[in-house]
Amino acid sequence: MERDRYTIQKEYGQERINHYVERFREGLLSELRGYKQWVTFRTEYDQKGKPTKPPRTPRTQRYADPSDPSTWDTLREAVNALRSGEMQGIGFVFTDIDPFTALDLDLCVGNNRSVNYTEQQYVNYFNSYTEISPSGHGLHILIKGKLPGQNRKIDNLDIFSRGHYMTLTLNHLSHTPSSIEPRQELLDSILGGSKPKEDIIYQPLPKTNLDLPKTNLDVDDVKESVYYEYLTNPLLQRLMDGHWQGRYPSQSEADMALVGILLTLTNNNAEVTRELFMESKLVRSKTFRKWGDSTYLDKMISQELSHMKQQK
C-alpha cells in the first residue's frame, strides 16, 4: 500500500465515525449518551505482543484515568476524536454516578461465529444489551444495576460498576435487546452464587451461531488494516523495521512477538501472518530453516496459535 499516511488515517477515521454515528442513530446505547464519561482508545502491545487498550482523553489523546473525571469527555468529543485516524474506538467509564454495570466475557466467541455454551447462558440470563468486543472474540453485556462493593470476577465473567472503563464497539449481538435493561435482582443472584439456568431466562435464545457480524475480510482488506496499524503503532513499526535491540533479549523473542501481533491483527490467519512477516526486516536465513517437517517461521505461527487456543 503506497498511499500516504495522512490519506489512510483520514479514511479509517471517517469510517469509524460513520459506524458509530449510524449505530447511535439506530438508538443503540441511548442511555449512555448524556453522560460525560467517554474516552477513546487505540490498541497497544506489550513486550510479548499481547494487545492492550488503555483509555485516552478525547481532546488530547493522552492517557485517561478511570478515576479522574477531568480526563473524560462527552460522546460528541469522543466520536470527533476518531477523525484524525489515530484512535480506533470509544469507551465508557463506569462510576457511582451512573446506574450501569458492565459484564465482560472474554475469549468466548469462536472463529465459526458461535458463542461458547457457558457464556451463552450469561447472555440468556441477563438478556440485556450485548455487543461483540473489538477483538471479535469476546462479549460485553450492559445492565442497569450496581455491585455493592468492589468489582468482581466470577469464572470467565468480569463485573464492574465503578473505576473501570469498557471499550464499546456498538456491534450489537442480534437476538439481544437493543436497550440496557434493569437487572439488579439477577446481578444479586449471581453474586450470591447462583448460576444461569434456562428456566429463569427472560426469553429463549439460540445456543449456537448467534448471527455475529462477520469478521472474515478479504485478504487485501486484512493486509490494508495491518498496514494502517503499522502507521499508528510504534511497537509494530519497530518490529516490522527490524529494530528489536534494547527491547528484547534476542531476535527470536522479537520474532515471536511480531507473530503474535500479526495473528491478532489478522484474526488468527496463519497464511496472511506468514506473508506479512515476510515483508518485515526481521526475516533472516533462520526464518526458512527446516524445523522438523516445517520451517522456523511456520513453527512459530503454529506454536502461537496453539498458545492462543489454550488461553481460550
Image (cartoon, grey):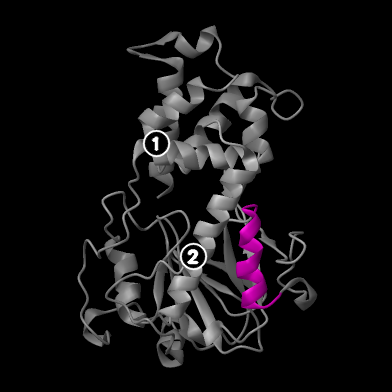
Q: Magenta stretch?
A: 73-86
Q: Say whether residue 113 is visible.
A: yes
Q: Is residue 242 above or below residue 198?
A: above
Report whether 156 appears left or right of 127.
right
Question: What amino acid type should be assigned to the residue bearing mark 2?
Answer: Asn
Residue holding disc 1: 220
Q: Residue 79 in the image: x percent, y percent?
A: 60, 68
Q: Is residue 46 above or below residue 116?
A: above
* Helix, strand or loop status at disc 2: helix
Q: Residue 83 in the image: x percent, y percent?
A: 62, 60
Mark 1 surroundings: few (<14), some (14-19) or many (≥20) residues within 10 A? few
Q: Nearer the viewer, residue 304 or 94?
A: 94
Question: What amino acid type should be assigned to the residue bearing mark 1?
Answer: Asp
Q: Nearer the viewer, residue 120 or 171?
A: 171
Count of marks placed on residues: 2
Q: Nearer the viewer, residue 238 or 102?
A: 238
Q: Say whether residue 49 is visible.
A: no
Tag 2 and tag 1, C-beta contact below 8 Å: no
Taking the spot 40% from the left edge, 50% from the top edge, the residue there is: 312
Residue 73 sits in quarter: bottom right
Residue holding disc 2: 18
Residue 211 counted in the magenta span: no
Report whether 124 appears left or right of 193.
left
Residue 81 counted in the magenta span: yes
Q: Residue 247 in the image: x percent, y percent?
A: 73, 30
Taking the spot 53% from the left edge, 81% from the top edge, the residue there is: 101
Q: Residue 239 in the image: x percent, y percent?
A: 63, 28
Q: Which mark is residue 194?
A: none
Q: Is residue 180 above or below residue 153?
A: below
Taking the spot 48% from the left edge, 57% from the top edge, the residue there is: 134
